[in-house]
Amino acid sequence: MAEVTDSKELSLRKGDYRPAEPDDLRAPCPVLNSLANHGIIARNGRNITAAELKAALRYLGMGFDVTAILVNGAFKVHSDDPKKGARLGLRDEDQVNEDGVPVLNLDQVGRPHAVEHDVSVTRQDRALGDCMRMNPDLLEQFLAAPKTERGFSASAFGKYRKIRYDKQKRDNPALEFDKINNFSGCAELGAVQCIFGRGFPYRVP
């Protein structure tokens, strides 16, 4: 079924690829960006409901439990003081669509003191540069990291995260990376392995 959000996109169907345009919003998360680029969620990255985001993550193969935890947390109200708000909350207070349903924009995923963190695999630390867009040098370093003939294993992912942490600890005096951030970073790569991995044990090609 064709999308009707924009006359320029009448020929596009869900699953068709279109890169982000200048006015589209995107997240620091490449998976969310890919979902938007393929029309699984709003291509402009705006006004995404919790139901739409849950359906999109299920489309990737995520379990109901993980999907519920991630989305329900993200749709809580954000606070720049993590002691006064939900740690994962990303929405503004009273941020709803025309039907009164809570919504989220993709760029809000990059808000500070929430789910986004330093020591990303493909993004620069917030204090050192652009933490939203993919850094080509970091991507090349990641793809060139040691791995088995069948691809990245859990061990290879873990070793590379340690390399990234050691480097950022040297290079970023303002590094913010506590135990929760470390858990988030490891969980991200764990999700990559579970979704895109092949064989047993899973390897990411």
Image (cartoon, rainbow, N blue to C red):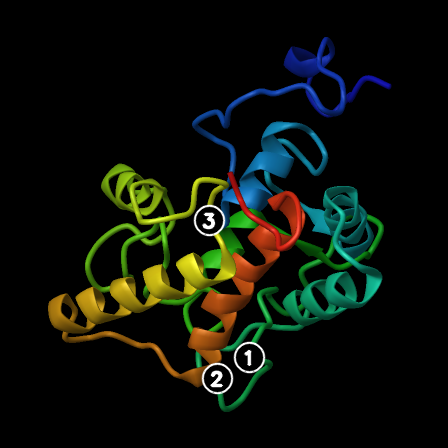
Q: Is residue 162 above or below residue 108?
A: below
Within-10-Å neighbours for mark 3: few <14, some 14–19, many 20+? many
Residue at (76, 18) in percent of width and height: 13
| Quadrant (top left, top right, bottom left, bottom right) of the N terminus | top right
- 173 vs 1, left or right, is left
Secondary structure of the residue carrying numbered label 3: loop
Q: Nearer the viewer, residue 17 or 143?
A: 143
Q: Which residue is mark 3?
A: 152
Q: What amino acid is found at the position of numbered circle 3 in the picture? A: Phe
Q: What amino acid is found at the position of numbered circle 2 in the picture? A: Pro
Mark in the foreground, 2 or 3 = 3
The Cα–Cα distance between marks 1 and 2, rounded to whole angstroms, is 6 Å
Q: Is residue 202 above or below residue 24?
A: below
Within-10-Å neighbours for mark 2: few <14, some 14–19, many 20+? some
Q: Residue furthest bottom?
A: 83
- 64 vs 26, left or right, is right
Question: What is the number of the mark on residue 184?
Answer: none
Can you see residue 1? yes
